[in-house]
Amino acid sequence: MTVVKKSRAGLANFTDKAGAAAVGARLRRLSERIDREATELYAELGVKFEQRWFGTMNLLDLYGPLTVGELAQALGITHVSVSQTRDSLQRSGLTTSDVDPSDGRRRTVRLTKEGKALVARLKPLWTALSQAAAELDQEAGDVLAALERLERALERSSLSERVRRLLRK
């Protein structure tokens, strides 16, 4: 019996060729690229800033002190993710947090003086990033609307529910 191996030429752009089966991989690839390029822009300003900090810092700047739960809800991410970001921001001296006196399980996060100064310094970059993202969205044919449709479809029936249904057939 002869075993025929696939040519390694098929590896090139495999994710692109995989179609809908690789939607998660493509979204991760795009996210990593956007984060990498944003990190380069922060570095050009001489700022060590993690892109994952943006949402938390922006919300704290816009709304003042917020609980971890409020941040998680506003960002649409898990409490654990926000807690990890909070810890990272605190280690960097950009935020501080206090135990809520009315509920010891809750922590209120606020920008420090250094955090406020950094936000003020980064606002022009954030505005430019937002404008560039709007340009990209328009050029790409309203990707945000497509992502919203994808999110709604997943809310109606999750990927795991869909796979289980298909496997039962």
Image: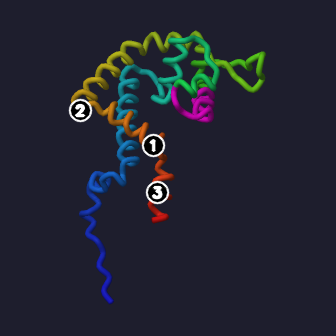
Residue at (40% x, 47% y) in the render: 24
Quarter containing the N terminus = bottom left
* Crowdedness near tag 2: few (<14), some (14–19) or many (≥20) residues, C-alpha within 10 Å: few
Quarter containing the C terminus = bottom left
Instruction: Say which label, 3 or 1, has the lower sequence index.
Output: 1
Residue 110 percent location from the top left of the image: 61, 15
The amino acid type found where label 2 is placed reads Gly
- Eye-nearest disc, 1 or 2: 1
- What residue sits right under mark 2 in the picture? 141
- 85 in relation to 64, above or below: below
- Which residue reaches farthest front? 169
The quarter holding residue 147 reads top left
Q: Is residue 160 left or right of residue 123?
A: right
Residue at (24% x, 27% y) in the render: 138
The amino acid type found where label 1 is placed reads Leu
- Asked if the magenta segment contains residue 116, the reply would be no
The amino acid type found where label 3 is placed reads Val
Residue stretch in magenta: 75-88
Q: CA distance from mark 2 to mark 3?
A: 29 Å
Instruction: Say which label, 2 or 3, has the lower sequence index.
Output: 2
- Eye-nearest disc, 2 or 3: 3
Q: CA distance from mark 3 to mark 1?
A: 12 Å
* Crowdedness near tag 1: few (<14), some (14–19) or many (≥20) residues, C-alpha within 10 Å: some
- What residue sits right under mark 1 in the picture? 154
- What residue sits right under mark 3 in the picture? 163
Query: Is disc 2 placed on a helix, strand or loop?
Result: loop
- Which residue reaches farthest left? 139
The quarter holding residue 84 reads top right
